Image: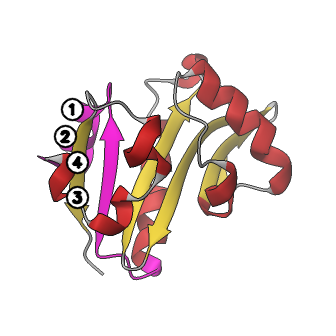
Protein backbone atom coordinates (compact mmCIF):
# COMPACT_ATOMS: atom_id res chain seq x y z
CA UNK A 1 0.00 0.00 0.00
CA UNK A 2 3.02 2.23 0.25
CA UNK A 3 1.66 5.02 2.43
CA UNK A 4 -1.53 5.51 0.45
CA UNK A 5 -4.48 6.57 2.53
CA UNK A 6 -7.34 4.10 2.28
CA UNK A 7 -10.83 4.67 3.58
CA UNK A 8 -14.00 2.56 3.52
CA UNK A 9 -17.15 4.64 3.68
CA UNK A 10 -20.75 4.72 2.54
CA UNK A 11 -21.08 5.29 -1.17
CA UNK A 12 -22.29 8.73 -2.23
CA UNK A 13 -24.53 9.46 -5.21
CA UNK A 14 -21.51 10.76 -7.11
CA UNK A 15 -19.80 7.36 -6.74
CA UNK A 16 -22.36 5.48 -8.83
CA UNK A 17 -20.51 5.71 -12.15
CA UNK A 18 -17.16 4.72 -10.60
CA UNK A 19 -18.81 1.72 -8.91
CA UNK A 20 -20.51 0.67 -12.15
CA UNK A 21 -17.19 0.96 -14.00
CA UNK A 22 -15.48 -1.24 -11.41
CA UNK A 23 -18.28 -3.84 -11.51
CA UNK A 24 -18.10 -3.92 -15.31
CA UNK A 25 -14.34 -4.50 -15.12
CA UNK A 26 -14.96 -7.32 -12.62
CA UNK A 27 -17.68 -8.87 -14.85
CA UNK A 28 -20.31 -8.42 -12.14
CA UNK A 29 -23.94 -7.50 -12.86
CA UNK A 30 -25.09 -3.89 -12.80
CA UNK A 31 -28.78 -4.80 -12.53
CA UNK A 32 -30.18 -3.52 -9.23
CA UNK A 33 -27.10 -1.49 -8.28
CA UNK A 34 -28.78 1.88 -8.72
CA UNK A 35 -31.91 0.76 -6.83
CA UNK A 36 -29.89 -0.39 -3.80
CA UNK A 37 -27.02 2.11 -3.96
CA UNK A 38 -27.91 3.66 -0.61
CA UNK A 39 -26.58 0.43 0.97
CA UNK A 40 -23.24 0.31 -0.87
CA UNK A 41 -19.79 0.93 0.56
CA UNK A 42 -16.69 2.06 -1.29
CA UNK A 43 -12.97 1.85 -0.67
CA UNK A 44 -11.15 5.02 -1.62
CA UNK A 45 -7.64 6.24 -2.02
CA UNK A 46 -6.46 9.56 -3.41
CA UNK A 47 -7.44 8.45 -6.94
CA UNK A 48 -11.04 7.74 -5.97
CA UNK A 49 -13.11 4.56 -5.71
CA UNK A 50 -10.97 1.41 -5.88
CA UNK A 51 -13.30 -1.12 -4.23
CA UNK A 52 -16.97 -1.68 -3.49
CA UNK A 53 -19.54 -3.94 -1.86
CA UNK A 54 -23.31 -3.67 -1.57
CA UNK A 55 -26.27 -4.91 0.40
CA UNK A 56 -29.85 -5.43 -0.62
CA UNK A 57 -32.08 -5.41 2.47
CA UNK A 58 -35.27 -7.48 2.60
CA UNK A 59 -37.15 -7.46 5.94
CA UNK A 60 -34.77 -9.30 8.26
CA UNK A 61 -32.59 -10.86 5.56
CA UNK A 62 -30.11 -9.40 3.08
CA UNK A 63 -28.22 -10.11 -0.11
CA UNK A 64 -24.50 -9.34 -0.13
CA UNK A 65 -23.49 -8.31 -3.64
CA UNK A 66 -21.02 -6.54 -5.88
CA UNK A 67 -17.78 -7.15 -3.97
CA UNK A 68 -15.01 -5.91 -6.23
CA UNK A 69 -11.55 -4.38 -5.88
CA UNK A 70 -9.41 -3.02 -8.72
CA UNK A 71 -6.76 -5.57 -9.76
CA UNK A 72 -3.82 -3.46 -8.52
CA UNK A 73 -5.28 -3.56 -5.00
CA UNK A 74 -6.24 -7.25 -4.80
CA UNK A 75 -4.52 -9.61 -2.39
CA UNK A 76 -4.09 -6.89 0.25
CA UNK A 77 -7.11 -7.73 2.41
CA UNK A 78 -9.43 -5.03 1.06
CA UNK A 79 -12.09 -7.53 0.00
CA UNK A 80 -12.16 -8.77 3.59
CA UNK A 81 -12.43 -5.24 4.98
CA UNK A 82 -15.22 -4.31 2.56
CA UNK A 83 -17.14 -7.48 3.44
CA UNK A 84 -16.70 -6.78 7.17
CA UNK A 85 -18.15 -3.29 6.66
CA UNK A 86 -21.20 -4.72 4.88
CA UNK A 87 -21.73 -7.47 7.48
CA UNK A 88 -21.46 -4.94 10.31
CA UNK A 89 -24.05 -2.74 8.61
CA UNK A 90 -26.35 -5.75 8.22
CA UNK A 91 -25.99 -6.56 11.94
CA UNK A 92 -26.76 -2.95 12.90
CA UNK A 93 -29.92 -3.16 10.83
CA UNK A 94 -31.07 -6.33 12.58
CA UNK A 95 -30.44 -8.68 9.66
CA UNK A 96 -30.48 -12.28 10.88
CA UNK A 97 -29.32 -14.04 7.72
CA UNK A 98 -27.36 -12.90 4.71
CA UNK A 99 -27.19 -14.55 1.30
CA UNK A 100 -24.96 -14.21 -1.74
CA UNK A 101 -24.48 -15.62 -5.23
CA UNK A 102 -20.98 -16.08 -6.64
CA UNK A 103 -19.23 -17.71 -9.57
CA UNK A 104 -15.67 -17.03 -8.47
CA UNK A 105 -15.43 -16.29 -4.73
CA UNK A 106 -17.01 -19.32 -3.08
CA UNK A 107 -13.84 -20.34 -1.18
CA UNK A 108 -13.17 -16.73 -0.12
CA UNK A 109 -16.58 -16.40 1.55
CA UNK A 110 -16.35 -19.88 3.07
CA UNK A 111 -12.86 -19.56 4.53
CA UNK A 112 -12.89 -15.90 5.56
CA UNK A 113 -16.46 -15.56 6.86
CA UNK A 114 -18.00 -19.00 7.32
CA UNK A 115 -20.64 -18.79 4.60
CA UNK A 116 -22.13 -22.17 3.75
CA UNK A 117 -23.50 -23.46 0.47
CA UNK A 118 -27.24 -23.88 0.12
CA UNK A 119 -29.47 -24.57 -2.86
CA UNK A 120 -30.99 -21.50 -4.48
CA UNK A 121 -34.43 -22.89 -3.72
CA UNK A 122 -33.60 -22.86 0.01
CA UNK A 123 -32.68 -19.18 0.07
CA UNK A 124 -35.20 -17.01 1.86
CA UNK A 125 -38.07 -16.17 -0.54
CA UNK A 126 -37.57 -12.46 0.26
CA UNK A 127 -34.11 -12.44 -1.40
CA UNK A 128 -35.24 -14.69 -4.23
CA UNK A 129 -37.20 -11.73 -5.63
CA UNK A 130 -33.96 -9.77 -6.16
CA UNK A 131 -32.79 -9.17 -9.71
CA UNK A 132 -29.62 -11.14 -8.90
CA UNK A 133 -31.68 -14.26 -8.16
CA UNK A 134 -34.21 -13.61 -10.92
CA UNK A 135 -31.97 -12.85 -13.88
CA UNK A 136 -28.60 -11.20 -13.27
CA UNK A 137 -26.72 -14.22 -11.86
CA UNK A 138 -26.69 -17.47 -13.82
CA UNK A 139 -27.86 -20.77 -12.34
CA UNK A 140 -24.19 -21.84 -12.26
CA UNK A 141 -23.54 -19.42 -9.37
CA UNK A 142 -23.02 -20.89 -5.94
CA UNK A 143 -25.68 -19.80 -3.46
CA UNK A 144 -24.39 -19.22 0.05
CA UNK A 145 -25.75 -18.03 3.37
CA UNK A 146 -24.52 -16.92 6.76
CA UNK A 147 -26.43 -16.54 10.04
CA UNK A 148 -25.55 -13.19 11.61
CA UNK A 149 -25.22 -12.81 15.35
CA UNK A 150 -26.44 -9.54 16.79
What is the distance, in whole Å, between disc 4 and disc 2 at their CAs?
A: 12 Å
Closer mark to the observer between disc 2 and disc 1: 1
Residue 65 screen position, x and y as percent: 46, 47
What is the distance, in whole Å, between disc 3 and disc 1 at their CAs?
A: 19 Å
Residue in the image at 25% along x and 65% along y: 124
Q: Residue under circle 3?
A: 123
Answer with left or right where residue 91 lies relative to residue 47: left
Task: Work out whether mark 4 precedes mark 3 in sequence or the reverse, and give the earlier one.
Answer: 3
What is the distance, in whole Å, between disc 4 and disc 1 at their CAs?
A: 11 Å
Residue bounds of the magenta highlight: 92-118
Q: Residue under circle 4?
A: 144
Answer with left or right where residue 128 lies relative to residue 52: left
Q: Residue under circle 1?
A: 107
Q: Which mark is residue 111?
A: 2
Closer mark to the observer between disc 4 and disc 2: 4
**Quadrant (top left, top right, bottom left, bottom right) of the C terminus:** bottom left
Amino acid sequence: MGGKIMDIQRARDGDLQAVQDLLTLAHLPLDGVKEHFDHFFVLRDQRGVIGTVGLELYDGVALLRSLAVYPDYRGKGWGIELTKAALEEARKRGIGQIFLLTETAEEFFKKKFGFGNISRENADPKVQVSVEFQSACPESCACMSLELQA
